[in-house]
Image (spheres, rainbow, N blue to C red):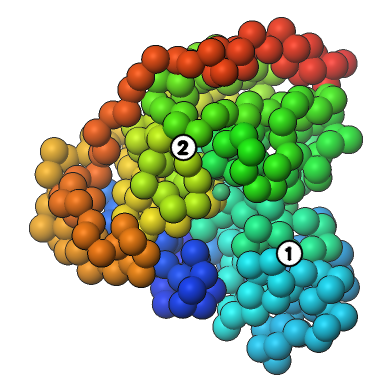
Amino acid sequence: MSPPLLIGSEIYRGSTYGPKHPLAIPRVSTTLDLIRSLGWLDERRYLDSPRATPEQLARFHDPDYLAALMRAEATQSVSPEDRERFRIGADGNPVYREVFRRPATGAGGTMLAARLTARGGVVHVPGGGTHHGMRARASGFCYLNDAVLGLLAWLDQGLSRILYLDIDAHHGDGVEIAFRDDSRVVTLSVHEKGRWPFTGLTHGRCGALNLPVPPGFHDAEMRALLHGAILPVIEALQPEAIMLQCGADGVEEDPLARLSLSNNAHAEVIAAVMHRAPRFVLLGGGGYNPWTVARCWARGWGVLNGRVPPERLPPEAEAVLRGLSFHRAAGRNPPEHWFTTLADAPREGEVRPEVAALLAGLPAMLESVAECAA
Ligand SMILES: [Zn+2]
């Protein structure tokens, strides 16, 4: 298999959802800077993300909605009708400078990743993972759903057994809904129970699998789910392709969720699943602490390339992390290890009964997968 590819874009540099929004922070640009400063990128393996065209986006999205999104970018405003109907400029989905171009670039990147893996391969798209985007509506800071578009691109190549795995702190509702009636895509989401969008509490029919976890969910519990649920599902499905949405908001220091993972959990999941199918695409997703996100996703690229994080970051990498600012409480006095390390300290513990109970649901999960394959 050829070495992994990294798809990024400079559109993210300096782009913001507005000063008070959780996505005021730089994420993809910092991740790319960190990867490069570690010397972990052969530039021949880096691709600039194309911007998906409205025609390409219409493979999933409603053309009227796409037109409204382009209108919002062009006028930097939204009509009351468009706001009401498409939730642009509402619910935390602001009109911002690149409100069409940026998500269209994320979508173009994930669709390109699907094309590049047509005959197999590994691709990382840290700007992808907008899993809440709906067909005709913005939702949860997501305007388009690049994951759905990438999965559709795989289906259009003739694949018929695909796993979409989502370890973001929030339920991957947009992807689950998009493939609810499509037996070719199994969706499996691990997310915090009782958190927005408040869905994903049970398994849906035909391979819509959900593992809602309690606050405080830690590395040992993720490992238990990995070996007791995720890998057995993969074993049963034998997918031709796996897409992993690797939101970093499950890491302890994230301000928008109450999970207690370290980035070791993300690294462990990536390492365990990346070779379980001939095609593997790693996406970004949520993540609202700039240090946590960049360290988690740069580490993900490292895992794909068999790189071990250095004990202490080289000065160039440390400078990237020291250059960040964060206008939330955690940004006032960031701990030193956010600047000097890539790997978090492990956060282990006992597997609590609530998590063990999810493992007891494995037979039902496998039944759902079998129903899907039938
Ligand atoms: Zn999230």
Q: Is residue 368 above or below residue 130?
A: above
**Whole-percent x and y of residue 337?**
18, 47
Which mark, residue 138?
1
**Whole-percent x and y of residue 242?**
61, 33
Mark 2 and mark 1 residues within 8 Å of each other at the beta carbon:
no
Judged from the image, the secondary structure of the residue bearing numbered disc 1 is loop
Q: Residue at x 54, y 51 (%)?
A: 285
Q: Which residue is drawn at 80% across and 43% down?
A: 177
Q: Which residue occupies the foreground of this view, 28 or 253? A: 253
Q: Which residue lies furthest to the bottom in this view?
A: 75
Q: Alpha carbon of mark 2 to alpha carbon of mark 1: how far?
A: 25 Å
Q: Which residue is drawn at 33% across and 61% down?
A: 329
Dot 1 surroundings within 10 Å: few (below 14), some, or many (20 or more)? many
Beta carbon of the mark 1 residue lies under 8 A of ligand 1: no
Beta carbon of the mark 2 residue lies under 8 A of ligand 1: no
Q: Is residue 30 above or below residue 258?
A: below
**Whole-percent x and y of residue 213?**
57, 28
Q: Which amino acid does label 2 sit on?
A: Leu
Which mark, residue 259?
2
Q: Which residue is drawn at 59% across and 80% down?
A: 96
Say which quarter of the image contains residue 261.
top left
Q: What residue type is labelled 1?
A: Ala
Say which quarter of the image contains residue 137.
bottom right
Res 42 seen here: no
Q: Nearer the viewer, mark 2 or mark 1?
A: 2
| Quadrant placement of the C terminus | top right
Q: Earlier in the sequence, mark 2 or mark 1?
A: 1
Res 313 seen here: yes
Q: Is residue 19 above or below residue 131?
A: below
Q: Which residue occupies the foreground of this view, 117 or 265? A: 265
